Image: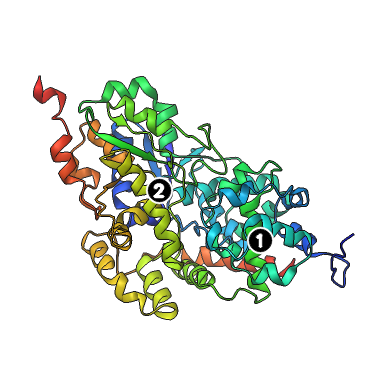
Amino acid sequence: MKYAYYPGCSLERNAGAYDVSTREVAEFLGLSLLEIDDWNCCGATEYFSQDELTAASVVARNLALVAPNLDQVIAPCAACYCNLIKTDRLMSEEPDLGEKVNEALAAGGLHYDAGRVKVRHILDVVYEDVGEQAVRDKVVRPLTGLRVAPYYGCQVVRPITSGDNTEHPTRMDELFTWLGAEVVDYPVKTHCCGGHMTQISEPAAFELIRRLIQNAVDGEADMILCMCPMCQLNLDAYQSRVSSYFHAGFHMPIIYFTQMLGLAFGIDRKKLGFGKELVSVEPVLREKLQPPVEATA
Amino acid sequence: MINVPTDQRGLTFLDDVIEETPGGEQIAHCLQCGSCSGSCPNGPDMDYTPRALFALINAGQRDRVLRSNTMWCCVSCYACTTRCPQDIPITDIMYALKRISLREGMATGTDAPALAKTFTGLLDKYGRSFEFGLASRYYLFNKPLSMLKMGPMGLSMFTRGRMSLIPTRIRQLDQLQTIINKAKELGEES
């Protein structure tokens, strides 16, 4: 199966672990990813706050650059995913805006027909296109004994869901039961991480981060699994400051779900971006991760 | 009967908001149920919660709405949008209010517009976002004292290869900038 791949700016650097683990897992599962040539930033939430037409045009350039023989694009970053899917839909539902976007694209020699490219999230591709049996068959290192809290965040499950439940998504939960992990009940799984509020108003953002981490602590989770670079950044990089702000003593690793998926498939750990997290997952992996099945047989 | 103020064209503030928001006409059907305010992660920091804001919009309270920090507290989590029983595209309305407020020079008292402008300025220049450039410029010009607190975190990010000191440029920057300029030009025409 072939897909266009839109990593987005975060995955280039800050969320490098998400990028390498997504590529490794995809290759392992036989999903061929073709990176969109010369893609540009999706504008996150910042362009739509200022100028809708320019915001949509900036996003649409990426859709227009999807190779003509491909009709699906995978975007692991939640903000990129949301912007791509939202722009595609805006162009279909607001034909006037769609026309103007194409007029802007035409100035750069490009064109995009709304609806041509289906925007997918990597979680949905693993869940739907690969599916339970194929995933189960490939597990060589079950995550038995590991307690994980699946954190979905906002912009993949809202506003446009791909089939999972918006209020109570379960796909990551299910996926990790296939891998043998113990999935903890994580009632805040779709709560907001604060987004860019860490830059604007720390007290507001810190309380949201505290709740998310405290809830995982209460559920006795070994780690929080995430699927968005912004969530990972806020919960991981700000964790020590949030912890001292509330005198909470947190040590909760925040790991991309693709990294743990790769481990379960027996992919070399060095290829999965471990060690880039600020709150190290190493102690818990050393203590709890089982050796690969072949090694024990 | 409340007298809702109108402009020279006979249009109310509600009309302006609807014009700026795809699907915005639903806002006229707000029931004041408060599902949005109850769902909002940043409600406590807002001058008016979303429900109060919609009442103000419907009552034509243009200045109070556009000068408020409400839309700038919105982080686009879409919790309100998916829960609204009247299908009001609330998050999109927040985006629309940000745009109107910026256009009319009423966005004061929050650093959010500065962050947004720094972010898109870098996008226009390089084609990619540039986290180090964003953080350094935004903090330097808006909250220089915070740079001290951010230092250790920045260093940890840097040593783990999660932050670069130089931006990545896309190859066809000219093409992107031409598209951006054309879009801005078309936006000004309408």
Q: In which quarter of the image is the N terminus of chain B?
A: bottom right
* Residue lying furthest front: A247
Give the amino acid type for the residue marked by disc 2 in the picture. Answer: Cys
Front in this rendered view, residue A113 or B103: B103
Residue depicted at x 46% and y 50%: A192
Left or right, A137 with respect to B85, comes to: left
Residue A54 in view in this figure: yes
- Going by the numbered disc 1, the residue's amino acid type is Ala
Q: Mark 1 points at which residue?
A: B96
Q: What secondary structure is marked by label 2?
A: loop
Query: From what the image shows, is residue A132 above or below residue B160?
Result: above
Q: Position of residue B102 (x, y in %)?
A: 63, 72
Q: Which of A50 and A247 is in front in this view?
A: A247
Q: How crowded is mark 2: few (under 14 residues within 10 Å), some or many (20 or more)?
A: many
Can you identify the residue that label 2 sits on? A228
- Which residue occupies 43% across, 31% down? A171
Query: Between A66 and A56, which is closer to the camera in this rendering?
Result: A56
Q: In the rendering, which numbered label is found on residue A62?
A: none
